[in-house]
Each structure stands twice: as C-alpha cells, then as structure tokens.
Image (cartoon, helix red, strand yellow):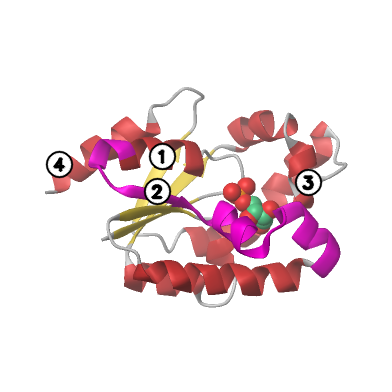
Amino acid sequence: MRLYLLGFMGSGKSFSGKQLAEKFGMSFIDLDDFIEEKEGRTIREIFEKEGEDYFRKIEKMCLLEMGQKEMTIISTGGGTPCFFDNMKWMNENGVTVFLETSVEVLSNRLFDEMQKRPLLKGLSKEELKHFIEKKLEERNPFYHQTQILYQQNLEGQDVAEELRRYFFRMI
Ligand code: S3P
C-alpha cells in the first residue's frame, strides 16, 4: 500500500506525512529529499543549473522508482501531480490525498521560507499571494483528480490525526 500526499508548497505534506506514517507504522519518503539525495545537490541548485524541464524529468523518474515501495507514505512536490501523467499514475498505483490549503495559510507559511524555494525567489508578500492564486488556478484541475480531499483552512489543524481517524472509519 502506498499513500501519496499532494498539495501546494507549504501545505504541510512532509510534516503531516511523517506523523501519519508513525501513527500507521508505515515508512515515509519525501520525494524532494529523495531527488536531492539521488542528484547529490539541492532542488534549488538543480533548478538553477539545469532548469525546470530537467527537474520535472528527474522528479517523474523518482516517482516511478517509488512505485516499488510497500507500506509507504510519500510526500510529493507541489508540482508533481501537474506534469506528464503523474496524477493518473499515482491514482493507479496508490491512494492519493490532496491537502487543500487556503491561500491565506499558504502565503503566511511560505513568506518566511521563500529563499529555499526556487519558484518563489525574490517575490514580495503581495506578489507571493498573486503567484499562489495564479498557480492554484492552473494546478487545481490536477489536484482535484485526487481520491481523497482534505481541507485545511485554519492554522493548527491536526492533519495527521484527522486523516488517521478518516482512514479508520473507512476500514
Ligand atoms: C515545487 C515544489 C517543491 C519542489 C520544487 C517545485 C512546485 O516541493 O518540488 O521546488 O512546483 O510547487 P514542496 O511542495 O515540497 O515544497
């Protein structure tokens, strides 16, 4: 069983994914970390030196490689479901959960850590909000192909615990 956590940057996929994996006694993998390890450099360096197209190819390759893992929660990158047939592939090879997060929550969280994220480098707070709104418009058609939609409109929701209860009710 593989569970893919999907969502925009800052939606807490890795944070909640790790907690959920612990609750279920499953393994956890962060796709971005896996890519960085494989490439021996940071995502930011990959974007800067090779460009986004190269990154998306590596991202897809790593996603397919994870298709071998059993009992694993995989936290994907914010753009992973939106390139190639990645979304369809994840739906066919595991359970997909989209952490839908409000623009308010996303922009507050992302403002403090923009330098780490190549797509956000150098934006003002106002520009960041516009960027998120525009990107979500493009990406929502992919995100909404998810099997499970979890809505996060407030800071401080215990995502992992709520998802744990959700899955227990389903069994
Ligand atoms: C990206 C999100 C990042 C990372 C890369 C591109 C995106 O992952 O994969 O910087 O296109 O939204 P996180 O969502 O884990 O930050």
Marks 2 and 1, the one that precedes in the sequence: 1
- Please give left or right for residue 4 compared with residue 44 in the image: left
Marks 4 and 3, the one that precedes in the sequence: 3
What type is the residue that disc 4 sits on?
Arg
The image quarter containing residue 43 is bottom right
Q: Which stretch appears magenta?
A: 22-50
Categorize mark 2 by other alpha carbons within 10 Å: few (<14), some (14-19), many (20+).
many
Secondary structure at numbered mark 1:
helix
Residue located 34% across and 49% down the image: 27
Judging depth in this view, the residue of 24 and 94 nearest the camera is 24
Q: How many marks?
A: 4
Q: Which residue is mark 4?
A: 169
Marks 3 and 1, the one that precedes in the sequence: 1
What type is the residue that disc 3 sits on?
Leu
Q: Position of residue 155 (x, y in %)?
A: 51, 24
Q: Which residue is mark 1?
A: 18
What type is the residue that disc 2 sits on?
Phe
* Residue 45 among magenta residues: yes
Marks 4 and 2, the one that precedes in the sequence: 2
Residue located 30% across and 31% down the image: 161
- Overall secondary structure of the magenta section: helix
- Please give left or right for residue 10 compared with residue 16 in the image: right
Cα–Cα gap, marks 4 and 1: 21 Å
Judging depth in this view, the residue of 58 and 84 nearest the camera is 58
Categorize mark 3 by other alpha carbons within 10 Å: few (<14), some (14-19), many (20+).
some
Cα–Cα gap, marks 2 and 1: 6 Å
Q: Position of residue 104 (x, y in %)?
A: 63, 31
Q: Which residue is mark 3?
A: 120
Q: Which residue is mark 2?
A: 28
Residue located 41% across and 39% down the image: 18
Vertical order, 50 against 167 (above or below): below
